[in-house]
Amino acid sequence: MKLFSLTFLILTLLIAVFLLSFTLKKPTNKTIYDFKLKTIDGQEISLLKYKGKKILLVNVASECGYTPQYKNLQDLHEKYGNKVIVIGIPANNFGGQEPGTNSEIKTFCSKNYGVSFLMMDKISVIGTDTHPLYEWLSNKTKNGVCSDAPTWNFCKYLIDENGKIIKFFSSKTDPLSKDIISLL
């Protein structure tokens, strides 16, 4: 009887472990192409539109010490636009440094930096109201690669041609740095 009880217990534990392995969160098969965003002008677009190109996503702000990176983001767009789509995503999560409306942000970027790369609707990139795209970008369980969330304005995610994250870059990384250019 003891052998039967021990065997039953072991079998029960093995089944429990097996079932638990299916319920644990595993990386989803989602890619960046499963997300939609609104442009700064309010037009909804699917990121699927950019399949086959690399994408550089940058959470931007108009009143930040890193705001001058807009110039190099524009230069990156102009010089390497055949290899990478630059997407600026305004966010007011760090120091209240993006207080403007979409219209004000668009005017600021155009007037001060000649921005012609894609700018999106202002969203939240951290916190309780984090946009689903940034929940995916910063959760390795969801994206299979990266657990880095933006720590300040002008953090960057480089995405490959298949919609998977290549690398996260901090605010300090210049858009025209060798670290980014070498991956294009």
Image (cartoon, grey):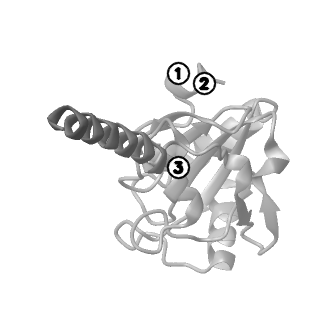
Residue 61 image point, x, y percent: 50, 63
Distance from disc 1 to disc 2, alpha carbons, whole Å, reads 5 Å
* Residue depth check, mark 3 versus mark 1: number of the one nearer the observer: 3
Q: Report the side of 71 relative to 138 (left or right).
A: right
What residue sits right under mark 1 in the picture? 178
Give the numbered dot on residue 181: 2
Are the residues tagged 1 and 2 within 8 Å (C-beta)?
yes
Judge whether 154 appears above or below 146 on screen.
below
Residue at 52% in and 42% down? 27
Residue at 72% in and 69% down? 40
Q: Quadrant of the N terminus?
A: top left
What residue sits right under mark 3 in the picture? 137
Judge whether 36 appears above or below 144 on screen.
below
Distance from disc 3 to disc 2, alpha carbons, whole Å, reads 21 Å
- The amino acid at mark 3 is Leu
Q: Which callout, 3 or 1, points at the residue further toward the start of the chain?
A: 3
Q: Which callout, 3 or 2, points at the residue further toward the start of the chain?
A: 3
Distance from disc 3 to disc 1, alpha carbons, whole Å, reads 23 Å
Quarter of the rendering containing residue 9: top left
Near mark 3 (Cα within 10 A), the count class, few <14, some 14-19 or many ≥20, is many
Residue 106 vs residue 146, the one in the foreground? 146
Residue 115 vs residue 90, the one in the foreground? 90
Q: Report the side of 148 relative to 116 (left or right).
A: left
Q: Residue furthest front?
A: 1
Residue at 41% in and 51% down? 149
Callout 1: SS: helix
- The amino acid at mark 1 is Lys
